[in-house]
Image (tube, rainbow, N blue to C red):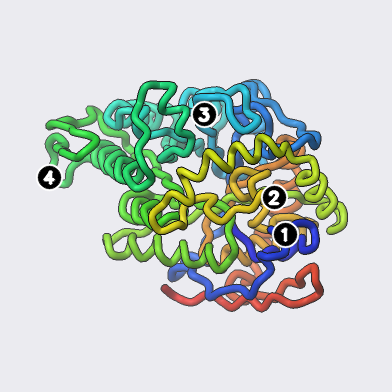
């Protein structure tokens, strides 16, 4: 997801080109006073979060993941996102289904919010609303859903479902979100839900009982269609790595859609964290990851996601402008700039907060140990900076090139 990369110029073409002048911040009024939230990508698929021969200490099994989830909530993480795959792809030969895996992590934890990724077209929204309502009651309102419009055509074909073009997938997701929200929140005047869409139809149906806390709904993407969906129908907008200028544009547009619909939406950004004792160690680790990239797998992924990115009519879909180096981490996580010492990464997070980011969704090379270190060494520094007023009173961060990145203070809007 984003970055004026404050840390790692000179390591890859991607990071170098992201060191640009920071744009105007897009924090909504008073939201910059709220603490930054942190989440992590659950490794419920094999292969790790980078497609590289570099060593990755991780495990897609449930015992390992229960342990990591317990550690995450102890270290200050509020969210965990399970991945959805139905076929082996992009170095992930094995996968555990996201919803059932999420329920297991909820059972293992007490405070962690667990977000299950689901595909419209492979779930019926009324059935999923029932499942979510029950999960909310069992687990104290900590179950959430990430509505993923889909990028891997072969999954849909293998399961006998039609593969829709880009904007049609997002139209289907819009209906899916509307049905979920109406069923789990109930109708304003009471009674059953009636919904007649092009993809879903609901006839006088109600959840009995409705959840006391409706599930939080996430929706992602980078295209105009994705932003419209999130702004109009979701609680959170998730986006991949991007330059700060691109990230600011996305935040302005999604919050514009929300405002016109009389609602508000929060924003999460993906980031791959490489936190080391020195800048040199962090740069070297990034270089090693990219140098060890599985070229065939990365190029196959690039070909597959053209349907999700460049195929968007506005040309702004996810991965539309991703380089080979970017795609080694499949959520463009290097672009976010969370690479360096704990101090530099904490200051970078404050910069992202000033841009209007509410949640940092993190990936790690060595999941358990690096999540542990991030919680011990980075999150407390972020809290100190937030308490000092750094979110409202920015201090320039030194670029690796020796220049200063004068990030402006947030403005209302």
Q: Mark 4 — residue?
A: 189
Report crowding for label 1: few under 14, some 14 to 19, many 20 or more residues within 10 A (C-alpha).
few
Name the image quarter holding residue 254: bottom left
Q: Mark 3 — residue?
A: 85
| Residue closest to the eye, 266 or 399 | 399
Total marks shown come to 4
- Looking at the image, residue 396 sits to the left or right of residue 112; the answer is right
Q: Quadrant of the N terminus?
A: bottom right
| Residue closest to the eye, 312 or 353 | 312
The CA distance from mark 3 to mark 1 is 30 Å
Q: Mark 2 — residue?
A: 325
Q: Please give the label number shown on residue 13.
A: 1
Residue in the image at 48% along x and 77% along y = 411
Of pointers 2 and 4, the one earlier in the residue sequence: 4
Of pointers 3 and 4, the one earlier in the residue sequence: 3
Q: Is residue 387 above or below residue 315?
A: below
Report crowding for label 3: few under 14, some 14 to 19, many 20 or more residues within 10 A (C-alpha).
many
Q: Is residue 315 above or below residue 120?
A: below
Of pointers 3 and 1, the one earlier in the residue sequence: 1
Percent position of residue 325, x then y:
69, 50
Whether residue 133 is visible here, answered yes or no, is no
The CA distance from mark 3 to mark 4 is 39 Å
| Residue closest to the eye, 38 or 336 | 336
Of pointers 2 and 3, the one earlier in the residue sequence: 3
The CA distance from mark 2 to mark 4 is 52 Å
Q: Secondary structure at mark 4?
A: loop
The CA distance from mark 1 to mark 2 is 8 Å
């Amino acid at each position: 997801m984003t970055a004026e990369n404050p840390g790692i110029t000179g390591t890859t073409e991607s990071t170098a080109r992201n060191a640009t002048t920071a744009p105007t911040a897009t924090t909504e009024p008073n939201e910059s006073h709220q603490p930054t939230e942190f989440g992590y990508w659950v490794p419920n698929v094999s292969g790790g979060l980078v497609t590289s021969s570099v060593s990755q200490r991780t495990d897609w099994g449930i015992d390992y993941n229960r342990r990591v989830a317990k550690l995450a909530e102890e270290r200050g993480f509020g969210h965990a996102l399970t991945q959805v795959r139905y076929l082996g792809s992009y170095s992930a030969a094995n996968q555990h289904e996201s919803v059932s895996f999420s329920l297991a992590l909820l059972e293992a934890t007490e405070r962690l919010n667990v977000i299950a990724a689901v595909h419209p077209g492979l779930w019926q929204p009324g059935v999923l609303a029932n499942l979510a309502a029950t999960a909310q009651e069992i687990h104290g309102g900590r179950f959430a859903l990430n509505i993923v419009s889909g990028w891997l055509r072969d999954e849909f074909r293998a399961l006998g479902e039609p593969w829709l073009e880009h904007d049609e997938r997002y139209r289907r997701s819009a209906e899916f979100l509307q049905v979920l929200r109406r069923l789990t929140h109930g109708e304003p005047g009471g009674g059953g839900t009636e919904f007649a869409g092009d993809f879903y139809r609901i006839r006088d149906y109600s959840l009995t009982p409705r959840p006391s806390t409706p599930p939080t709904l996430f929706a992602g993407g980078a295209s105009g269609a994705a932003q419209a969906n999130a702004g109009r129908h979701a609680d959170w907008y998730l986006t991949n790595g991007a330059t700060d200028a691109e990230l600011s544009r996305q935040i302005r547009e999604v919050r514009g859609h929300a405002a016109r619909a009389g609602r508000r939406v929060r924003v999460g950004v993906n980031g791959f964290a490489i936190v080391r004792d020195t800048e040199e160690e962090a740069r070297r680790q990034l270089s090693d990851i990219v140098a060890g990239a599985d070229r065939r797998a990365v190029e196959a992924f690039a070909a597959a996601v053209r349907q999700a990115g460049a195929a968007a009519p506005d040309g702004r879909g996810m991965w539309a402008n991703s380089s080979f180096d970017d795609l080694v981490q499949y959520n463009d996580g290097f672009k976010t700039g969370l690479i360096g010492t704990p101090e530099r990464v904490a200051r970078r997070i404050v910069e992202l907060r000033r841009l209007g980011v509410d949640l940092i969704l993190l990936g790690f090379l060595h999941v358990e140990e690096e999540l542990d270190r991030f919680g011990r060494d980075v999150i407390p520094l972020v809290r100190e900076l937030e308490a000092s007023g750094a979110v409202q009173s920015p201090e320039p961060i030194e670029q690796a090139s020796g220049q200063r990145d004068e990030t402006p203070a947030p403005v209302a809007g």
